[in-house]
């Protein structure tokens, strides 16, 4: 029996990196997948790849930092598939690196708007639907930087810490309503986000980041998708409010 047979799985930021790998994992387990993302050049290729594993997948264009667009996107998921059984709030950006005192208001707002406000906007609508269904699972993509600081990324770390606070508070609120809410805290994972941040393309920077992990390597999107699948299905039926580290040992130091 497939672990997510006929479930509706909504994934924000599902066209790339970790989100795409989670979408493929969900589709392989029999889920109807709704990808909520901004349009990109990779859209056709990513959707074709996901549909290889289950043709019942749709793309819904939406900027998660826009409250009205999120409301419309969530409505579209429900009108397409009838439910939202699992939601992975994963869309995120690295932002422009800067020291706190030198950071512009725009640099700060850009990251908070997508990485924190976007998660809240999505959760608000997902929860409304899940309360009606009396069931649901929400998984929020935080980070190791949701638990510790990182010089040059105060906006990103603040947003990811906020995601854990939001996860735990909502988990408490809905624990008796059949809704489980957890977070994932990946270490540095080889995705286009790291390439955009100039980490994977520069050998010295890459080595410095690799060395921060006791396992002395970066993680893969597949390793995060495995954790996502565990939290998404009944294998984790007694888990709520957790922030699951998948980080090559980064946080134990
Ligand atoms: N790669 C890492 O090392 C790492 C580590 C910890 C946490 N994370 C988190 O994992 C998540 C996925 O990151 P990734 O590495 O796969 O990055 P990625 O750049 O490969 O994918 C991010 C996806 O989010 C989408 N997105 C960005 N802004 C959006 C918006 N405003 N509205 C809707 N969609 C938007 C992008 O289009 C893209 O499809 C992010 O939340 C990121 O912060 C990544």
Image (cartoon, rainbow, N blue to C red):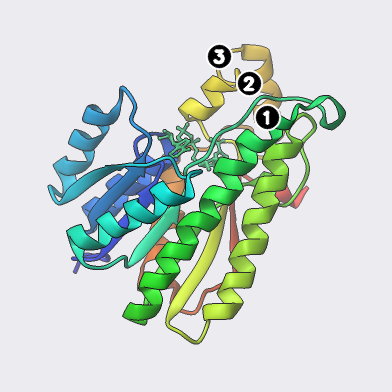
Mark 1 vs mark 2, CA separation in Å: 27 Å
Which circle marks residue 106 in the picture? 1
In the shown orientation, is residue 172 left or right of residue 158?
left
Q: Position of residue 168 (x, y in %)?
A: 63, 69
Disc 3 to disc 1: CB gap under 8 Å = no
Q: Position of residue 236 (x, y in %)?
A: 45, 72
Q: Is residue 31 above or below residue 233?
A: above
Disc 3 to disc 2: CB gap under 8 Å = yes
Residue reaching furthest front?
Answer: 68
User: For disc 1, does the CB lie below 8 Å from ligand 1?
Assistant: no
Residue reaching furthest left?
Answer: 55
Mark 3 vs mark 1, CA separation in Å: 26 Å
Q: Quadrant of the N terminus?
A: bottom left
Of marks 3 and 1, the one in the foreground: 1
Of labels 3 and 2, earlier in sequence is 3
Which circle marks residue 206 in the picture? 2
The residue tagged with tag 2: helix, strand or loop?
A: helix
Disc 1 to disc 2: CB gap under 8 Å = no
Q: Is residue 99 above or below residue 29?
A: above
Would you say residue 222 is visible in this rendering? yes
Would you say residue 142 is visible in this rendering? no
Q: Which residue is mark 3?
A: 201
Of labels 3 and 1, earlier in sequence is 1
């Amino acid at each position: 029996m497939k672990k997510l047979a006929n479930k509706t799985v909504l994934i924000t930021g599902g066209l790339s990196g970790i989100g795409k790998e989670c979408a493929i994992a969900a589709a392989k387990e029999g889920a109807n997948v709704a990808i909520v993302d901004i349009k990109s050049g990779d859209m056709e290729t990513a959707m074709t790849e996901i549909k290889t594993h289950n043709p019942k997948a749709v793309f819904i264009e939406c900027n998660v930092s826009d409250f009205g667009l999120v409301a419309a996107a969530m409505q579209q998921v429900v009108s397409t598939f009838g439910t939202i059984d699992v939601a992975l709030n994963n869309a995120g950006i690295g932002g422009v690196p800067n020291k706190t005192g030198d950071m512009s208001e725009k640099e700060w707002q850009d990251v908070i708007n997508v990485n924190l406000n976007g998660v809240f906007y999505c959760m608000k609508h997902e929860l409304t639907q899940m309360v009606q269904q009396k069931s649901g699972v929400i998984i929020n993509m935080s980070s190791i930087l949701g638990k510790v600081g990182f010089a040059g990324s105060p906006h990103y770390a603040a947003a990811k810490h906020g995601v854990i606070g939001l996860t735990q508070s909502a988990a408490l609120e809905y624990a008796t309503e059949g809704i489980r809410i957890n977070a994932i805290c990946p270490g540095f994972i080889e995705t286009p986000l790291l390439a955009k941040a100039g980490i994977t393309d520069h050998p010295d920077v890459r080595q410095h980041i690799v060395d921060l992990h006791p396992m002395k390597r970066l993680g893969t999107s597949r390793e995060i998708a495995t954790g996502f699948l565990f939290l998404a299905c009944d294998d984790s039926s007694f888990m709520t409010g957790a922030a699951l580290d998948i980080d090559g040992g980064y946080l134990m130091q």
